[in-house]
Structures are given as structure tokens and as C-alpha cells.
Image (spheres, helix red, strand yellow):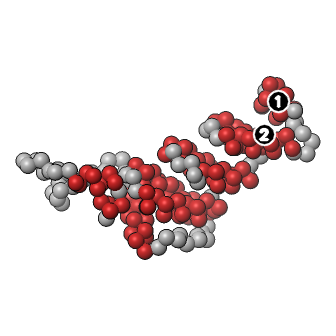
Amino acid sequence: MFEESSDIFQDMFLLPPLQEISSDGSSDEQPLFLHGVRKMPFWRLLMAMEQCKFSSRAEEYNLDSGTAQILFQEWVSVLELTCMWQMAKVCERVIEEISNLFHQVGHQDLIYLLKVLDKLGISEIRDRFIEHLSDGLEPIKLIKLGIEFPIYSLLINGYAMLAMQKGGISTEHEELLGMRTTSKLF
């Protein structure tokens, strides 16, 4: 199953074994250790690999917030494994699962996801999550997040919302942003 889903594992097992030394993963007595891989993300990865054979649509979840958060975090950790082991088809499935859950989790989980997406270099789905995150945050928070990560679209959305809000830019926001940035916004 791993050889079918992953270029890394396929290439690893295609290598000819050394004659006198048994290699990792060649038998039950000589297992392949996956250092740093936690049990639950690995289990979810196996589930995603199996689901890829049968279905291409993830089901919509309707969970309580605590369960949704745990499930979301597990799927994000599976996303990291799929990228690490170059499992493109499984990665697509995992992204579907994450997409079905991201409406049910808090901003901190979405920020964590954005960090992971940046680390993994997955930009094609990032904008969808940024848009959802932008809907529920104050402009100044969006600006701070945009600067911290750096996520240009969060920064621009935050600046636009701040400049267009009723009453304009407050003195408090001016102090947080600095005179130079505030004058550019005006």
C-alpha cells in the first residue's frame, strides 16, 4: 500500500538489497522504524490511503467543537506526513477532510494550519483558509497575523478593513501601527 501511494517508499523498496545485510522493512524481525511519527497521525494516514481506493469525496462533518478540533489537528498532522512521503493522491484526500472541518474550528487552529501550509509550500488551498480566517477577526489582528507569518493577503485584508471601518482609524490603532503606516493608510 505504501509503495503504491508514495514515490519515496516505492523508490526505497526498488533498491536492490545488500547481500549480507538485511535492510529495514525487509521482514518482521527487521522492521522499518518511522522515527518522529506519532501513532494517531499514522493511523489516520492509513485510513486516508485506504479511502483513496474507494471514494474521492469526503463527508461533511457535524461534530462538537472539541471533537472537530482534535480531528482537524490530526488531519493536519497527516497532511505533513503525506507531503514528507510524497503521497500526492492521499494528500488531496487529506485536504478534502481538512476542508470539511475548517468551518468548525477556531482561529488558532486555522493559524496553525496556515503555518503548516507555509512550511510545506502548499499555496493552492491557503487562500481559502485565509478568507475564512479574515471573516471573523478584527482588522488590527489580521494585520498583526499578516506581519507575523507573513501572509500578504491577511495584511491587505486587515489594512482595507481598518481603513474602511466606521469612524476611521482610532488613536489606539494608530499607536499600534505606527505613524508611518497610519499615514500611508490615510
Rendered image quadrant of residue 179: top right
* Residue 53 vertical position relative to residue 132 in the rendered view, above or below: below
Which percent across, then down, holds residue 63?
A: 60, 69
Which image quarter is the C terminus in? top right
Give the residue type that dot 1 points to. Answer: Lys
* Contact? badges 2 and 1 (CB < 8 Å): no
Secondary structure found at label 1 = helix
Q: Residues within 10 Å of mark 1 (few under 14, many from 20)?
A: few
Which percent across, then down, holds residue 102?
A: 61, 59
107 or 96, which lies in front?
96
133 or 128, which lies in front?
128
Give the residue type that dot 2 points to. Answer: Tyr
Which dot marks residue 39?
Answer: none
182 relative position to 153: left or right: right
Residue under label 1: 184
Residue at 69 percent across and 43 percent down: it is 153
Furthest-bottom residue in this view: 54
147 or 62, which lies in front?
147
Q: Residues within 10 Å of mark 2 (few under 14, many from 20)?
A: some
Which dot marks residue 159?
Answer: 2
Secondary structure found at label 2 = helix
* Residue 139 vertical position relative to residue 109 in the rendered view, above or below: above
132 or 41, which lies in front?
132
Residue at 30 percent across and 60 percent down: it is 3
Comes first in the chain, label 2 or label 1: 2
120 relative position to 101: left or right: left
* Residue 21 vertical position relative to residue 78 in the rendered view, above or below: above
Which percent across, then down, holds residue 13?
A: 23, 54
Which image quarter is the N terminus in? bottom left
Marks 2 and 1, how far apart in space? 10 Å
99 relative position to 90: left or right: right
